Image (tube, rainbow, N blue to C red):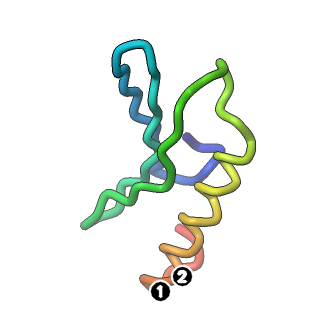
Amino acid sequence: MPSIGANCHELRVDDGNVSWRIVYCLDTDAVVILEVFRKKTRATPEHVIEVARRRLRAYRQTIGEEQR
């Protein structure tokens, strides 16, 4: 999901009649789970994208990287 950041992806999980999405980022030595949400509409909600961006930024600051 380039709208969130580099190396960010969305995993789709169907569980019966519920569709889940896991937004994650691949790092050199980690898979960072940014958000998990129930998919109800075709588009990813803007608040989910904002939460994922904020969490990715916090992760990168924690490991000492502002931007990649």
Classify residue 51 by image quadrant: bottom right
Name which residue type carries label 2: Gln
User: Which of the 4 image quarters holds residue 32?
Assistant: bottom left
Q: CA distance from mark 2 to mark 1?
A: 5 Å
Q: 21 above or below 50?
A: above
Mark number, residue 64: 1
Label placed on residue 26: none
Is 27 situated above or below 66? above
Three-letter code, disc 1: Gly
Among all residues in the image, which is located at the extreme front? 17
Q: Indicate the position of residue 61 as horizontal and vertical percent values.
A: 54, 82
Q: With 56 as the anchor, is 53 left or right in this view?
A: right
Q: Kindly identify the residue that appears in the image at 56 percent across and 27 percent down.
A: 39
Q: At which x and y percent is residue 10?
A: 46, 36
Residue at the location (47% across, 86% down)?
64
Q: Quadrant of the N terminus?
A: top right
Which residue is label 2 attached to?
Answer: 61
Badge 2 marks a residue whose secondary structure is helix
Residue 14 against residue 25 in the figure, above or below: above
Q: Is residue 44 above or below residue 27?
A: above
Q: Are marks 2 and 1 in contact (CB under 8 Å)?
A: yes
Residue 56's spot in the image, x, y percent? 54, 64
Query: Circle 1 sits in a helix, a strand or a loop, which is it?
Result: loop
Does 45 sit left or right of 52 as displayed?
Answer: right
- Residue shown at the point (59%, 43%) measured from the top left: 2
